[in-house]
Image (cartoon, rainbow, N blue to C red):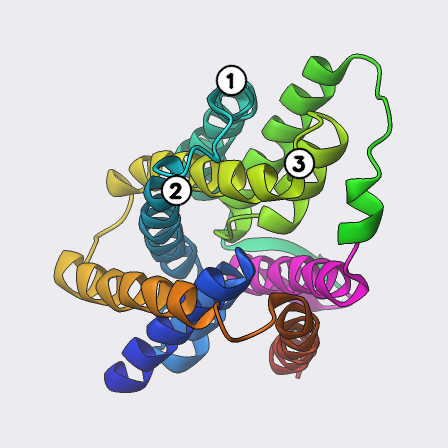
Amino acid sequence: MEIAGFIAALIIGVVLGLIGGGGSILTVPVFVYLLGIDPMQATAYSLFVVGLTALTGAIRNSTKGLIDYKVAILFSIPAFIAVYIARKYIMPALPDTLFTLGGYEVSKDFGIMVFFAIIMLLAAFSMIRNKKDELDQKKEVKGKAFWVILEGAGVGLLTGIVGAGGGFLIIPALVLLAGLPMKKAVATSLLIIAVKSLIGFIGDVENLQIDWMFLLKFSAFSIIGIFLGIYLNKWIEGKKLKKAFGYFVLVMAIFIIYKEVG
């Protein structure tokens, strides 16, 4: 199963390299259902893998001058504050039993996975609809800085809860609110994802026991995957792949809901 997990890590990296996002949405299901790690630990591990892999992509993009650092800082500060608070204080404070409904106890692990499945559904619909053409037709938005900061805090909180990068939320915000071209938005998004994910993981280090050897090996496979994905991107059309991957994420989300509710 550990070998299967490392193969999955490679696939996650390949998807990130091919379409610039989305792959991180698979890390939590891989940790929970394939490797048998509990959801709280899985979301923490996901933050580290997502952060390190996204950082690799961001460094590559920085050499091409594609990152808007001013926008990245504006978005990242509220995002990493929110994600750190979520991982350090909010998640550990949640009770093992969230509430009781009709005699059924809704556990913390159940709540995390169902909420994660809902986020996967949103991500899937975002990839299937493929709003790239709509996003390229930018509209003037008043108070851009305020909305960018607000979006940053919201995405940071979301990342802290589910352990995913949230690129499907960040990229539209950078295009519509910050006025960035699509290529710059994707590149800047990777830097934001890297910063907030790794800072969020810092909030877990004091609360959880971390298997560093396993985590570094898993991350290494994901990083190899992102370079492989970037290489394959020359021959595979990212637009079609993104839609196909969206359907795959949709199926995965339905599977998680069925697994948890069943």
User: In terms of sequence position, does the residue under pointer 1 or pointer 3 come before the other?
Assistant: 1
* Front of the two marks 2 and 3: 3
Q: Residue furthest left?
A: 213
Residue 212 falls left or right of residue 96: left
In terms of secondary structure, where does tag 2 sit? Answer: helix
For disc 1, the neighbor class at 10 Å (few under 14, some 14 to 19, many from 20) is: few
Q: Position of residue 255 (x, y in %)?
A: 64, 81
User: In terms of sequence position, does the residue under pointer 2 or pointer 3 come before the other?
Assistant: 2
Which quadrant of the figure contains the N terminus? Answer: bottom left
Q: Which mark is residue 70?
A: 1
Q: Position of residue 234 (x, y in %)?
A: 48, 68
The reply to whether discs 1 and 3 touch (Cβ–Cβ < 8 Å) is no
For disc 3, the neighbor class at 10 Å (few under 14, some 14 to 19, many from 20) is: some
Residue shown at the point (50%, 41%) measured from the top left: 187
Q: Which mark is residue 181?
A: 3
Amino acid type shown at disc 2 = Ala
Determine the main secondary structure of the stretch shown in magenta.
Answer: helix
Residue shown at the point (81%, 63%) measured from the top left: 129
Q: Where 220 falls versus 71 (above or below)?
A: below
Residue 63 falls left or right of residue 12: left
Residue shown at the point (46%, 28%) measured from the top left: 80
Q: Which mark is residue 58?
A: 2
Q: Quadrant of residue 120?
A: bottom right
> Is residue 16 among what the camera can see?
yes
Q: Nearer the viewer, residue 23 or 136?
A: 136
Q: Where 143 falls versus 168 (above or below)?
A: above
Range of magenta residues? 102-131
User: In terms of sequence position, does the residue under pointer 1 or pointer 2 come before the other?
Assistant: 2
Amino acid type shown at disc 3 = Pro
Is 35 covered by the magenta stretch?
Answer: no
Amino acid type shown at disc 1 = Lys
Label 1 and label 2: CA atoms lie apart by: 15 Å
